[in-house]
Amino acid sequence: MTTAYATNGVVVRDCTPADLDVVHALHVDAVLHSTAIWQEEPHPRAYFDTWLSERQGDGYPVLVAEVDGVVAGYATYSQWRPHHGYRLTVEHSVYVVESFRGRGIASTLMRSLVERATAEGRHVMMAGICSTNTGSIALHEKLGFSTVAVVPEVGRKFDRWLDLTLMRLPLA
């Protein structure tokens, strides 16, 4: 399924290999400077060539948002857990380039992901968010997600324990 449409000056479309430098830069920033990704070392750029191919080959979308021809962020989802019984539940990720934050890019990407997941017959979309990321939690609440659990001290990064907020959105 190809996505390419504009809303509020943001064009949302399927990611192509030409977009992966921005995807990689967002990944590196999140790994090195935030608790959005609980990993210590970023993946090398070449990793994302295989990542994109596998995601799309498995039928999972990777969407990018463009503003005036510049990639401003990306979002994706895949199966929440590996066992067959979870096949209709997905977990998503959304990242926005710092200079584009606060302009509704994440909301636009998320709405596109929810539309895609709903059209594919998915049942639930999950979000796993570091509990200190109150901005992301507020965004998800605005989009209809509800907190189903806060799991204390299940991750560790930057020499501190991290709590995980699990949020859930039932899909129509």
Image (spheres, rainbow, N blue to C red):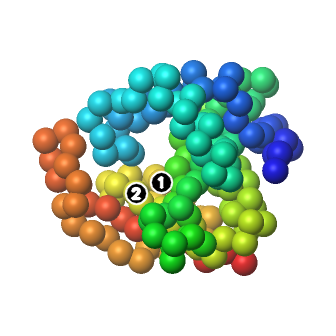
Image coordinates of residue 46 in percent, x first then y, are 49, 23
In the picture, the quarter occupied by the C terminus is bottom right
Look at the numbered discs 1 and 2 and tell me whether their residues touch, using CB distance below 8 Å. yes
Asked whether residue 75 appears in the rendered view, the answer is no
The kind of residue on which mark 1 rests is Ser
For the point 66% across and 71% down, the residue is: 122
The relative height of residue 88 versus residue 65 in the rendered view (above or below) is below
* Residue for badge 1: 136
Position of residue 67 measured from the top left corner of the image (x, y, whole percent): 75, 30
**Could you tell me which secondary element the residue under label 2 belongs to?**
strand
Q: Residue at x 30, y 40 (%)?
A: 39
**Considering depth in this image, is 17 or 114 the residue closer to the camera?**
17
Residue 154 location, quadrant: bottom left
Q: Position of residue 159 (x, y in %)?
A: 13, 41
**In the image, what residue type sits under mark 2?**
Ile
Among numbered discs 1 and 2, the one appearing first in the sequence: 2
**In this view of the protein, can residue 47 be seen by the observer?**
yes
Which residue sits furthest left? Answer: 159
Q: Callout 1: helix, strand or loop?
A: helix
Q: Which dot, 1 or 2, sits closer to the camera?
A: 2
Query: Is residue 28 positioned above or below 59 on the image?
Result: above
Q: Residue furthest right?
A: 5
